[in-house]
Amino acid sequence: MTTLLNTGKMLERLEDVVALFNFADGIKTIGDLVKQVNALSIKYIDLENDPDGDKVNSFKGDMFEIFGEIFFRAFKNDPEVGLCEYETVTLDDDYGVDAIGTNANGDRVVVQFKFKGNPMEVVEYAALARTYTAGRIRHKLDLDKHDTIWLVTTGNGVTGPCKEVLGKRLRVIYRDILAGKIDNNMSFWKDVEEQIGTTLDACGN
């Protein structure tokens, strides 16, 4: 089993990662994931030095991206959610692109993760416009083909303008789709723990 690409984020958040993805008493559904990430994020609240909540949002994003990498590894051959040749973007500021992969048509695609604490919340157009622009300009990808902008969110999808402007370029894996793949899927959650354990062992932790 190969190590995860998000090793840096895992080591930075080691205590939280172990608590969150412990198979014995950890999360088993997408609802669990959201609830526990929200709970763990409380300690990063710093109203005096971080009034905009950047530390909290960064933590939530990191946890969801770690989960997302394992999700795509587990379901890379799934016709609905599968991506292969998955690579994380390592820029200090990803400019709206968290990862790059290859879809079932053989096209390179951009992936953006959006953690939403409210299951009914949707992703706004501005966020995906940023993803599209960064994918075209910084990563030199052709994103005008079908299913070349991938959004993974714990929310309820996207706004109307996202659908209208981005059209068939956009592939949205929202909360209900995630739930259908992983809720109480013990094989998946055991794999999550094993992949994290393998990665941490390789780093000497």
Image (cartoon, rainbow, N blue to C red):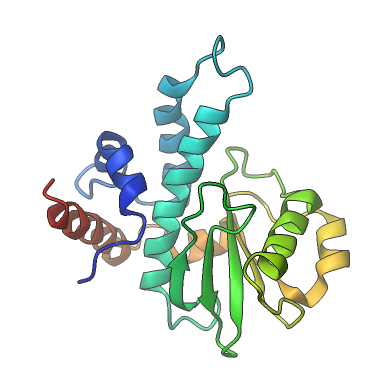
Where, quadrant-wise, is the N terminus in this rendering?
bottom left
Position of residue 53 relative to residue 106, above or below, is above
Q: Residue furthest top?
A: 48
User: Percent from the top left, x then y, of residue 101?
Assistant: 51, 75
Look at 41% across and 21% down and name the residue there: 43
Residue toward you, 143 or 125: 143
Q: Is residue 165 left or right of residue 17?
A: right
The image shows residue 131 at horizontal and vertical percentages of 69, 59
Image spot of residue 162 (x, y percent): 81, 60
The answer to whether residue 167 is left or right of residue 152 is: right
Question: Image height check: is 135 above or below 129?
Answer: below
The C terminus sits in image quarter: top left
Front residue (pair 133, 172): 133
Figure disc tally: 0
Please tell me which residue is depicted at 72% across the width and 48% down the height of the picture.
122
> Is the residue 93 above or below the residue 164 in the image?
above
Give the residue displayed 45% in from the left and 59% down from the top: 68
Residue 30 seen in this snapshot = yes
x, y percent for residue 28: 35, 51
Quarter-wise, where is residue 137 in the image?
A: bottom right
Quarter of the image for residue 183 reads bottom left
Q: Nearer the viewer, residue 139 or 100?
A: 139
Can residue 27 be seen here?
no
Between 150 and 108, the one lying in front of the other is: 108
